[in-house]
Image: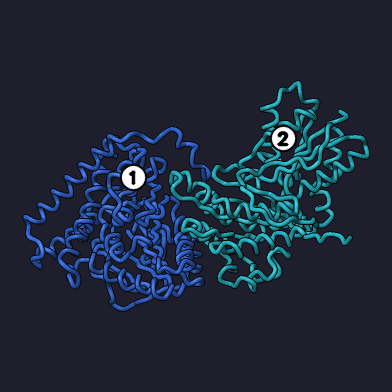
Amino acid sequence: MKTILWRKKASDKSQNWINFDQSLRLKSGSKEDQIQALSMMLKIRIVENKLAENRKSGIIGGPVHLGAGQEAIAVGISKHLRKSDRVFSGHRSHAHLLALGTEPRRLFAEVLGKHSGLTKGMGGSMHLWDGPNGFYGSVPIVGGTVPLAVGAALASKFQGKGGISVAYFGDGAIEEGVVHESLNLARQLQVPILFVCENNLFSSHMHISQRQPLTSVARFALANDIQYEMIDGNNIVSVEESAKKLIQIARRDNLPVFIEAVTYRHYGHVDWREDIDVGVNRSPEDLKLWKSRDPIDRLETALLSNRLLDKDELKQLKLQISNQIDNEWDLAIQDPPVETSSLLSDVLRR
Amino acid sequence: MSKLPTTSYGVAIREAFSYLLNNYPEVFIIGQGLWSPWYVGNSMTDLDKEFGIKRVIDTPVSESACTGAAIGAALAGMKPIMVHPRMDFMLYAMDAIVNQAAKWSSMMAGQAHAGVTIRSIINRGGEQGAQHSQALHSWFVHIPGLRVVMPYSVSDARDLLIASVLCGDPVIYIDDRWLYSNEEVLQPIVELDLKSQGPKVIKDGTDITLVSAGFSTQLALEAAEKLNTQNISAEVIDVRVLSPLSPKIILDSVRKTGRLVAIDGGWGPAGFSSEIITIVTESIEPKLLKSSPKRVTLPFAPAPAAANLERIYYPTSDDVARSAVNAVRR
């Protein structure tokens, strides 16, 4: 697959494609907003790379599912969320969490099994929680949190404060029956939820073309009468625009909405490897092509060409974020491990 | 003096719902058949009309998503009650119950709790066959992070449902349609703390201990009457809260009687009756046991549909009494 083009709609036979190679058209928003988005994407990327490196060296003992390459989706969506919204995710959730403002140190500590971690060392990378920032939980049972997010949205509707849920999941999860039940239920109950399918084309080792008759998943939103958009998930401008529009509908009308954001992960399914040839259709050429569509590079290029940032400023920004994350890692690694009493203390409510 | 009015088991459950909906705005009920008189006997009659269809939600045929949604709503501060009109149908929801609700508190280090009550009805007999009959309480007792409640008495049907919804943990509350016409004079509602509830001696005896829960407790009580006519004094313990199990009352009783029959409306292997026998044999000196512990369970086969097979499939109080007599007069 040298080039990957996309129909806007699964049923659309016309030449209505997403162009994954177009340069970003920066529109509204202040310079500060744009730089904030870039900073957040850089922060996520550097965190993921840090985790990859330390998993490879063996300092991290458990699996990490890294989202490098997919940062624009979480950053673009989170821009339109409130602290009182409720975000749920799956195994590849670090970006969704960090984009809400969680300190990397607490994620690092969790991955390292430290008491200072997000779930006090009880969850590890695959079971994360940061309620005060709106992150209601991620778990690795594929599709497992999707109905939970629907229920949290139902709670938001009862509570009447304009809150919404976000359910992040992947193209693999859409193959789970419970996700279809959840789409139907959300529409039938009319609850405010944004479903976000990050279609990175792979479920573990399997390319979507080996798992589904069509490579777009938004057809399932259509089937459930849920308003949806299919977008280039590596284009922060597209993500922000779609998220803004659809989140407004969810909040205002108490309705589910759906974004299919097409993207690609730089690392393989789990840990630091690239998984070349583990799955069919994941060739070095494909990886190279998708890296040329890197969401961070594209925003940097747009900021530089629009003279919102110069090269020195960019260099400075990267250095500053990188130093900060090194520092947070160093702090996390010195934190004490999870307490042995934690094994039994929270099985039931104390 | 006029006789005090009684309440049936089914109506007592409805009273619990009504109490919860009246007193706790965060309570809502979701499940299949809640707007229909067909599915849940007289245990929820017209709740939808009294409290509105926004708080008493009949659903699409989606046990998995609905149970997950109830859990998600609990994580977001509600006190939902998920109703499965038959336990068999709930199996589609096992991920939500076992992987999500049960583990949430521990995984998230006690920072969030899936305080959802999952009401599951055992509805068997009547030639319904293998998929409209199961009593799977033992499965849930095996899972850390769940509380499992099986009321026998009419007052427990009401009061333990209220306690389940208010306790803040995920609770599997299991009631049995075969108990719905039992009647009792009920006292005014007093909220109980589920954590302090456990097995109860509901009939004193000295020769043998019968341990059971839910409908099996009815069999145990009937058997105790029959044993009485044979000069065997049976003590009956209604377990009420199967998990986490407080063993003390059971152990004290067996230390006294030296004999045990565990009665379970489910299957034997790795079942709740196995657990009762295990805690007894682990904790009581063999020399204190006057006979080996016994159990009365279903035959190890799916439930039949034909009436003549149903008659031999489900244990009766005669089966319980026979087992007890064998233990006493071995």
Q: Nearer the viewer, mark 1 or mark 2?
A: 2
What numbered label is drawn on residue A64? 1
Q: Amino acid at mark 1?
A: Val
Q: Is residue A48 left or right of residue B11?
A: left
From the image, state the color of chain B. Answer: cyan
A29 or A279: nearer the viewer: A29
Q: Chain of mark 1?
A: A
Residue under the point 76% across and 41% down: B263
Looking at the image, residue B320 lies above or below residue B309: above
Asked if badge 1 and badge 2 are on a common chain, one would say no
Question: Which residue matches tag 2?
Answer: B250
B114 or A197: nearer the viewer: B114
Q: Position of residue B139 (x, y in %)?
A: 62, 45
Q: Is residue A188 left or right of residue B281?
A: left
- Chain corresponding to blue in the figure: A
Q: Position of residue B154 (x, y in %)?
A: 75, 54
Q: Position of residue B313 (x, y in %)?
A: 79, 49
Q: Is residue B146 left or right of residue B45?
A: left
Q: Is residue A210 visible?
A: no
